[in-house]
Image (cartoon, rainbow, N blue to C red):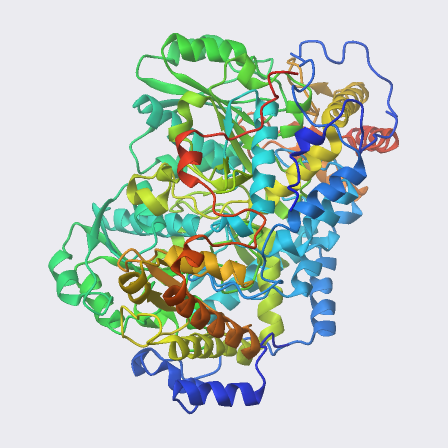
Amino acid sequence: MSYIALSDDDKREMLARVGVRTPADLFHCIPEGVRLRRLLNLPPAMAEPELDRHMSGIAAKNTYGDYLSFLGAGVYDHFIPSIVDSLSSRTEFVTPYTPYQPEVAQGTLQAIFEYQTLICQLTGLDVSNASLYDGAHAAAEAVLMIHRLTGRNRILVARSLHPQYRETIRTYTRNVGLVIEEVGYGTCGGLKSAELREKMGDDVAGILVQSPNFFGVVEDLKACAETAHARKGLLAAVAAEALSLGLLEAPGKMGADIVCGEAQSFGLPPAFGGPFLGFMACAKAHLRQLPGRVAGQTKDVDGKRGFVLTLSTREQHIRREKATSNICSNQAWCALRATMFLETLGREGLREMALQNVHKAKYAATVLSKIPGVKLRFSGPFFNEFVLDLPKDAAAAAAALKAKGILGGLPLGGFEPDAAKALLVAVTEVRTKASIDRLAAALEEVLR
Amino acid sequence: MIREPLIFELSAKGKRAYAMPALDVPEAKGALDGLAVRDGIEGFPEASEVEIVRHFTRLSQQNYCVDEGFYPLGSCTMKYNPKINEKIAALPGFAGVHPYAPADTVQGCLEVLKRTEDYLCEITGFEAFTLQPSAGAQGELTGIMLIRAALAKRGNPRKVVLIPDSAHGTNPSSAHLSGYAVQEIKSNPDGGIDLEELARCMNEDVAALMVTNPNTLGVFESNIRRAAEIVHAKGGFLYMDGANMNALTGIARPGDMGADVLHVNLHKTFSTPHGGGGPGSGPVGVVKEMVPFLPTPYVVRTANGYGLDDDRPDSIGRVRGFYGNFLVVVKALTYILALGPEGVREIAEIAVLNANYIRKSLEGIYNLPYDAPSLHEVVFDDKIQKDAYGVTNLDIAKRLIDYGFHPPTMSFPLIVHGALMIEPTETESKRDLDGFIETMKTIAEEAKADAGLLKAAPHHSFVRRLDETAAARNPVLKWEKPKSE
């Protein structure tokens, strides 16, 4: 298939005007030594019906869809209202570039402005950027931001922060002289507050804590904020399950200076890990250190309201190596979907969806922990995800469940040293009572 | 024209666009015990389904997009995005897959990643690719970190990265974030790499030279091999920014030019739509020496198909969650398979033909600050119009909007004052190219006859020129409930 729009006559005419005989003549400026003198070794071109068959065939090799899944761990299966797919796939949203020319991009810019407003309302903070790549990236940017804001080099990161976020933070901070120290979790699954207080010194820029954390446990953000602020440090609260913000107190209201994380739950499918949606909001005082694009409201020459990308003196195309971040392209279309999702669910719908998550997860935890030998690993409160301690190796149990058509959760053996028997189970509103009961029956059987 | 209000201004208490099914599990007493629950979300919108549908439909109509017309935004490669790519990426077999699913249940996804890597290696001439970086800038960051890791392995990570003054801003920013000082090197009179300057700057403290090729003037760096030798002779690496790969596909390969690391933008060269600002994807290709440092996990072929290798002790680690913007990769693979080897070469051939056709047609009417032969894009400036009539590149750009075209990239590269960077891509028809050319000529005439008309443009857009200074001075970054309510 070719997507070229020139006829042979067009090409002839155009080559003549340019003054060359063949397209190959256009490349004389490339030295012979680096010219490719053969065709690329790629599969032959496919017509659309073949291509459709071929790619659908690859998709069909994924058998994941055949399983009943309780996987979560930062990626959640939530219902996506039809209007999100329908509206977000409008070509006027899909095929423009970044809105550098605001007069012809008011649709995208107003949507970003609405997105920023929604994120501020959810997080309880003053300003939001237009998006970051994903939750892991947002966490890394948050660490760099609190370092810039305080001028301090030590950062405390909760051990219960998503392991991929911790890895990404390590990668992003390794070469810029920051010291990342982990703070452990207790039997409740939450941060050890004594350890946190002890490590929080005057040389610490701040604390990064996830809530609900990687184990599903909701943290005491208020206490974390007090600990950070007592030493003039900052608290960055991370939400890897953004839906929790629909029900739980806004982290900004509990003292978090920065709230960031992963908003995949807002209208984005699991998509084998991406594209997702990193979000970040902060207090107004910290605006100048916020990474990424920001849309703002202004007026045109007739006094009419309009929107533009603004505060670009923070950004790489103006500030170059002194920019707050190197980010350029972000996840705009994902943010658009989140905006549509949140506006569709609305004030009541979002809360109800969040509440159903709590109730279904609670029900699942109750039923599952009644199985002999199975208990909840942590005592702390949770949102839609929890860790079970099984009487045997969790990976083996998961494999046995898989043989019964169930992906029962994520075995944590590879993540935590003493967690070979631990299984992280997510239960969202799309899992029915019948499917939860099926998991319980199957688990009981495989543990017997 | 009536402006669409903000959703918050449409909102009315009690309206719904969504209903939850009844809860099918018993509501446990004390389910919320221990949780700090919020009262409600202050200001959160409440609207009906039809209002939301009209809201976004109307907003969409205020956007200009590739499917509407010519979008010659230089360095952004705004080519047509085939519809089949969207259809394939939306298949539940791809979109519905959880990234923590066991490897044997996601063989199709891993095949997509591995085969895309194979094809990118063949197109660019590298040993291996990581598909993890989310966009070009993250690709650059990853690439420079790979260089740092390789140098550290040799014993000294070094201190400086050399970057030409014509580079994208992400280059210095990414180098800085990798712990390097940035040293700018002046371009030669042709806008290319100045070999003498490079030789002068290159020493044992320099980790890498970052080069965009073709450069941001759309000109091939004909000294690239020589530049690579100068850098390599002192033990440094050559990083190539592949943002302009659209000029080279099937014609020449960065790996054959002496580059050690390259990022490509799937949302440019490989036709995945830009979505109003992303998601993109910035895969990074490397030579053999650097393979051990690639981010984890790395997709590998196994006895039973494909697997994920996490055990790579020299790896720089991950740069984000999971495996990258996977669905973007699916679209790029679909595109490569649609085109085949001839089609991939045709990208560059026709992209370069179209750019040169525009150049030839507008030369003399607009000033060409650099005379070197153009590849996929041509950079004019506003010198003729500005000197004679005070009309700037901004005025020309805004006037294009009135005629139904997206403006070119303005004021970039920084080495061209008043730049108009035009990249037509390969997918434009002659009719649309001619329409643009005629319009640019008309605007040049208008500049003569009525400069004020251009200064006040655009006249026919939803909003007219916006006060960007006021937006930055008094930032209004979210809707606030009016005080009177």
Image quadrant occupied by the C terminus of chain A: top right
The residue shown at (73%, 64%) is A57
As drawn, A13 above or below B185: below
- On the picture, is A256 further left or further right than B112? left
The percent coordinates of residue A39 (x first, y second) are 48, 82
Q: Is residue A224 visible?
A: yes
* Viewer-nearest residue: A204 or B153: A204
* Viewer-nearest residue: B49 or B216: B49
**Which quadrant holds residue B21?**
top right
As drawn, B396 above or below B347: above
- On the picture, is B128 further left or further right than B9? left
Image quadrant occupied by the N terminus of chain A: bottom right
The residue shown at (34%, 60%) is B419
The percent coordinates of residue A391 (x first, y second) are 71, 24
The percent coordinates of residue B175 (x first, y second) are 30, 47
The percent coordinates of residue A42 (x first, y second) are 55, 75
The residue shown at (29%, 80%) is A31
